[in-house]
Image: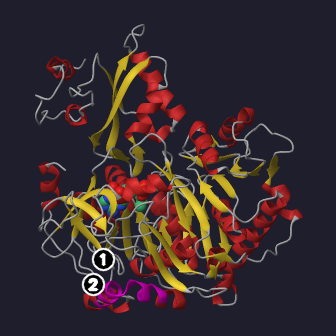
């Protein structure tokens, strides 16, 4: 991380204590209580989690062993039988929560829907029975390619109910990306919709599913279940495709939850890494249920009457853990919004807060920066007084955005929880507990109880106060990823051997750099690897490079991140062309479109620079450091003497 970034992080020195009123009513009301929990968990993590598992979740059968740790493979609550769909639904039906709103949904064109726990349970049972009718059994995989509609949550819970693992593919990914993921997971059924609304437009989803499955390209898929949302014209494959609204009335609303082993596969979620192929992150049942349940409860200090809104998409881990499983396991009301702030109504986010009296609002720094840019008038013209707690996730938040969030959205009255975590961690790892932790703008503060985090050097030795290093976790936790789907070796190499294990002690390396200040607060500084964070979305540079070189004109490509005021980072690609092609603006546009086709719009390069050659070391490795400097218009720093051809750098500086 550059010095200028550290300086900008350090500029804001203020510390914000929770208000006495907030603390008094909070579940974790003080640092003393936090510290007690933290110490208790650190002294005996297994006992700490076992106590909570017993108190907080419903089990069909209790476990024999809390933790079986054969580094780097962990098993939690071994021998236990549980179902997360049961914990999210059935157990609330015998309480006053039966008729409480489980999901409040706002559709983009203005339609809205509320599903109570009883209604959600009914729909989930019906969809589970439709899946069963398609031959889906315990252990099978089901692909989801959905807009942000209640049926996305229904589908996840329906899979979990019958013991089928879901793999949700974000609706913004292309047909090609969808096909790869469905094939890797060998999905039996795909659940999708005709389309969804986003920024005043109906976007097609079913056409991408058709394209992904074309020519029997995913032989494992036998059926496609289609939810009607936009009523667009779509192609139909008789025998394979089934409308949800036609199937729903034909099945029973009774479908008991399947008792699952604690370690049975719950879902696979693909995420970008440093190599070309996205990794299928594997999460299992009991540990994930417990950890998302506890982190949601304590970090959001959830109250029975709260309306909670997380603006993520269910296609990402944030949607899995903190729109669906964490909130519903706690019997909370979770608001889902279909779209993004749209041209015809830039104030819609705040309209929704006002309309539903949202109490807890959780979003990403990139969204906060976009709201800032839209101006203070939009939030100021709405009544946001229902808000009592704000959250952020996805990338380091710049103190300026943090302060704006606090003052303009929170009215200086709401604690902000900056939650650091990852697809791999399943739930929050570093986070304030809002009634306890004094917050510092830009810091994700301290580890959640039960999480032993540190900042270390390349050998695994702790670094000094305020020294930069690698952010690691030193002890397994219940919702940690179990492996890379079908590739234990990649799991071991990627996460556990980057920092070599010492004396049998393994450190989980997250891929992020961080420092710890004198108060023990963590400051996450971003990825140390070739992973970009564009608007809070994770993209591998290799993935984009592979997409570029699959175009006939491209000989070689190197992708780096360029700082971007709104997105945090933007994709910047250096491209050398095959001999018969010449650089042009048309080709630039075509290559950008090619990346969209191969991966999806989120990976579209902001800039492509054609060049005759890429800077390389004598052994032929591309020197990305130089490219990063060039892309950001910075002075090229570092030693250029190892370069094979010094003139390459000069030419690149001149823009060719
Ligand atoms: O670099 C960190 C950044 O997002 C990465 C994880 O991305 P993903 O698996 O897509 O999950 C995003 C939502 C949990 C991390 O390695 N990141 C996430 N939250 C923060 C963050 N960086 C700084 N501060 C955060 N609060």
Percent position (x, y) of residue 296? Answer: 46, 76
Q: What kind of secondary structure does the magenta stretch mostly adopt?
A: helix
**Mark 2 element type:** loop
Query: Residue 464 lies in what quarter of the image?
Result: bottom left
Q: Are marks 1 and 2 in contact (CB under 8 Å)?
A: yes
Q: Nearer the viewer, mark 1 or mark 2?
A: 2
Q: What element carries label 1?
A: loop
Quadrant holding ligand 1? bottom left
Sort mark 1 into few (<14), some (14-19) or many (20+) by Cα contacts within 10 Å: some
Q: Which of 410 and 639 is in front in this view?
A: 639
Residue 125 to residue 30: above or below: above
Regarding residue 89, the answer to whether it shows in the image is yes
Upstream in sequence: badge 1 or badge 2: 2
Residue at the location (12% across, 33% down)?
635
x, y percentage for residue 174? 57, 39
Q: Is residue 45 magenta?
A: yes
Left or right position of 518 against 240 = left
Of 39 and 312, the residue lying toward us: 39
Q: x, y percentage for residue 161?
A: 70, 71
Q: Does 116 sit left or right of 287 as displayed?
A: right
Q: Which mark is residue 413?
A: 1
Which numbered circle lies on residue 19?
2
Q: Foreground: 89 or 579?
A: 579
- Residue count near mark 2 (Cα–Cα under 10 Å), binned few <14, some 14–19, many ≥20: some
Segment tinted magenta in the rendering? 36-50
Residue 229 in sight: no
> Image height check: is 320 above or below 102?
above
At x 77%, y 36%, the residue is: 235
Inspect the magenta stretch and tell me whether residue 584 lies in it.
Answer: no
Q: Which residue corresponds to the image point at 70% horizontal and 66% vertical from the top-left?
A: 158
Q: Is residue 308 above or below residue 206?
A: below
Which quarter of the rendered picture does the C terminus lie within? top left
């Amino acid at each position: 991380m550059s010095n200028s970034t550290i300086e900008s992080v350090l500029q804001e020195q203020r510390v914000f204590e929770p208000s006495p009123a907030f603390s008094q009513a909070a579940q974790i009301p003080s640092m003393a209580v936090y510290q007690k929990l933290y110490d208790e968990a650190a002294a005996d993590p297994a006992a700490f989690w076992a106590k909570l598992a017993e108190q907080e979740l419903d089990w069909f059968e209790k476990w024999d062993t809390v933790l079986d740790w054969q580094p780097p493979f962990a098993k939690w609550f071994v021998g236990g039988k549980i179902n997360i769909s049961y914990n999210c639904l059935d157990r609330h039906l015998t309480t006053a929560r039966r008729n409480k709103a489980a999901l409040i949904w706002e559709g983009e064109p203005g339609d809205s829907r509320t599903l109570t726990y009883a209604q959600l349970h009914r729909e989930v049972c019906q969809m589970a029975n439709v899946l069963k009718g398609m031959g889906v059994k315990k252990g099978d995989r089901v692909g989801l390619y959905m807009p942000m509609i209640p049926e996305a949550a229904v589908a996840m819970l329906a899979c979990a109910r019958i013991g089928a693992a879901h793999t949700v593919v974000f609706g913004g990914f292309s047909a090609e990306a969808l096909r790869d993921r469905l094939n890797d997971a060998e999905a039996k059924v795909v659940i999708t919709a005709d389309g969804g609304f986003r920024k005043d437009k109906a976007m097609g989803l079913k056409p991408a599913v058709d394209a992904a499955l074309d020519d029997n390209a995913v032989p494992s898929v036998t059926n496609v279940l289609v939810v009607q949302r936009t009523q667009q014209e779509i192609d139909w494959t008789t025998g394979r495709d089934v409308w949800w609204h036609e199937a729903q009335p034909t099945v029973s609303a009774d479908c008991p939850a399947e008792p699952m082993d604690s370690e049975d596969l719950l879902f696979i979620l693909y995420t970008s890494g440093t190599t070309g192929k996205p990794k299928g992150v594997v999460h299992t049942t009991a540990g994930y249920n417990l950890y998302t349940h506890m982190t949601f409860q304590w970090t959001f200090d959830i109250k029975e009457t709260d309306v909670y809104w997380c603006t993520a998409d269910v296609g990402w881990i944030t949607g899995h853990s903190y729109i669906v499983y964490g909130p519903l396991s706690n019997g909370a009301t979770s608001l889902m919004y279909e779209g993004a702030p749209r041209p015809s109504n830039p104030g819609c986010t705040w309209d929704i807060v006002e309309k539903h009296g949202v109490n807890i609002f959780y979003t990403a720094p990139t969204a906060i920066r976009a709201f800032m840019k839209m101006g203070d008038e939009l939030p100021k013209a709405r009544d946001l007084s229902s808000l009592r707690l704000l959250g952020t996730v996805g990338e380091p938040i710049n103190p300026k955005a943090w302060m704006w969030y606090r003052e303009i959205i929170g009215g200086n009255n709401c604690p902000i929880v900056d939650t650091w975590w990852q697809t791999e961690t399943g739930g929050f790892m570093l986070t304030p507990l809002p009634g306890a932790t004094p917050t510092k703008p830009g810091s994700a503060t301290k580890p959640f109880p039960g999480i032993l985090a540190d900042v270390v050097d390349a050998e695994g030795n702790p670094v000094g106060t305020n020294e930069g290093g690698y952010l690691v976790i030193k002890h397994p936790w219940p919702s940690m990823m179990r492996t890379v789907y079908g590739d234990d070796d990649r799991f071991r190499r990627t996460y556990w051997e980057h920092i070599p294990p010492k004396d049998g002690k393994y450190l989980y390396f997250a891929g992020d750099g961080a420092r710890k200040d004198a108060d023990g607060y963590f400051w996450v500084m971003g990825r140390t690897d070739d992973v970009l964070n564009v608007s809070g979305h994770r993209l591998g540079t290799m993935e984009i490079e592979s997409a570029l070189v699959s175009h006939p004109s491209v000989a070689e490509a190197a992708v780096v991140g360029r700082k971007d005021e709104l997105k945090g980072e933007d994709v910047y690609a250096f491209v050398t062309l095959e001999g018969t092609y010449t650089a042009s603006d048309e080709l630039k546009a075509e290559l950008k479109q090619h990346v969209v086709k191969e991966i999806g719009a989120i990976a579209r390069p902001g800039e492509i620079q054609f060049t005759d050659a890429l800077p390389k070391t004598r052994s032929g490795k591309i020197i990305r450091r130089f490219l990063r400097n060039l892309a950001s218009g910075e002075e090229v720093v570092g030693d250029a003497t190892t370069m094979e051809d010094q003139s390459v750098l000069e030419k690149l500086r001149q823009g060719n």
